[in-house]
Image (spheres, rainbow, N blue to C red):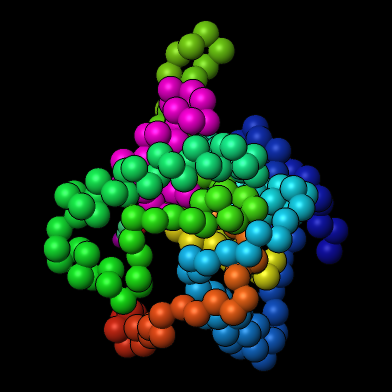
């Protein structure tokens, strides 16, 4: 059979999909191995200040940006900060919001739910981790003459890309934490983002402090997270 590498469908060029199909046995092994690998991932709050090369951060961001997105609009900007002065400003602003949250905005029930995780208003990792990646969502695009152009399923798209970024960070042997200072608009101001961008998540990236202890929590078993309809 002579498979063409390019064809035209409805006027648009298509390229042949490079399938990664495995045998049944390989499929079983690979799916277990990847599950076991990702099950080792933990949110880490204590970092070492060992540098991580910029090229690695670029590769992690490129990996995240392979995520599917509504109408392939890729409605995201990843801002990577290693500048110590800027990290210090981000820490100061985040801690001011967190102080307000922990002291008056968060309910007692919410704080009780967080107790096992040991979080509080202090965020030293914002200065110690070598990189902070702030994920921004683009609520719309801005055209050449300043007009608004639609993006679609923005939260879903940026959520998926963020999940892939977290997976890539784990795969690189580094650690992160999904930090959500709230409200987050101080980040757009400090990083001079355009009017169509909103901060979505802040991920410190680096090596864990050695040793690092994480809460001994369990993941829900399959029968509590899945239903099968066969
Ligand atoms: N944003 C706060 C509070 C917080 C909220 C949840 I939900 C967490 O899982 C962890 C923390 C903070 O970063 O401390």
Q: Quadrant of the N terminus?
A: bottom right
In the displayed image of the protein, which residue is found farthest to the top? Answer: 145
184 on left or right of 143: left
Q: Position of residue 145 (x, y in %)?
A: 52, 8
Please say if 134 is above or below 31: above
Q: Is residue 63 visible?
A: no
24 on left or right of 116: right
Residue at 63% from the left image edge and 64% from the top image edge: 48
Q: Position of residue 160 (x, y in %)?
A: 48, 55
Residue at 37% from the left image edge and 34% from the top image edge: 185
Residue nearer the viewer, 202 or 63: 202
Q: Is residue 224 visible?
A: yes
Residue at 40% from the left image edge and 44% from the top image edge: 94
| Residue 189 part of the magenta segment | yes
Q: Quadrant of the C terminus?
A: bottom left
User: Which quarter of the frame holds ligand 1?
Assistant: bottom left
How many marks can you see? 0
Please say if 30 is above or below 104: below
Please say if 120 is above or below 137: below
Residue nearer the viewer, 138 or 89: 89
Please say if 27 is above or below 148: below
Q: Position of residue 220 (x, y in %)?
A: 35, 83
- Segment colored magenta: 179-202
Residue at 43% from the left image edge and 22% from the top image edge: 195
Q: Position of residue 49 (x, y in %)?
A: 66, 59
């Amino acid at each position: 059979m002579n498979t063409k590498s390019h064809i035209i469908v409805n006027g648009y060029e298509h390229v042949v999909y490079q399938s990664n199909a495995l045998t049944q046995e390989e499929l079983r092994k690979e799916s277990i191995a990847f599950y076991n690998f990702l099950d080792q991932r933990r949110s880490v709050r204590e970092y070492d200040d060992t540098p991580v090369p910029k090229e690695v951060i670029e590769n992690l961001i490129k990996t995240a940006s392979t995520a599917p997105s509504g109408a392939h609009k890729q409605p995201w900007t990843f801002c990577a900060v290693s500048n110590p002065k800027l990290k210090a400003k981000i820490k100061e602003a985040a801690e001011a919001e967190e102080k307000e949250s922990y002291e008056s905005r968060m309910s007692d029930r919410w704080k009780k739910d967080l107790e096992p995780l040991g979080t509080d208003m202090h965020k030293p990792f914002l200065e110690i981790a070598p990189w902070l990646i702030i994920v921004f969502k683009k609520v719309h695009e801005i055209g050449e003459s300043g007009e608004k152009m639609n993006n679609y399923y923005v939260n879903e798209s940026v959520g998926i890309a963020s999940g892939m970024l977290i997976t890539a960070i784990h795969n690189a042997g580094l650690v992160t934490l999904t930090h959500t200072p709230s409200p987050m608009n101080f980040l757009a101001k400090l990083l001079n983002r355009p009017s169509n961008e909103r901060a979505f998540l802040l991920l410190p990236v680096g090596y864990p402090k050695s040793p690092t202890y994480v809460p001994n929590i369990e993941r829900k078993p399959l029968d509590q997270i899945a239903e099968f309809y066969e």
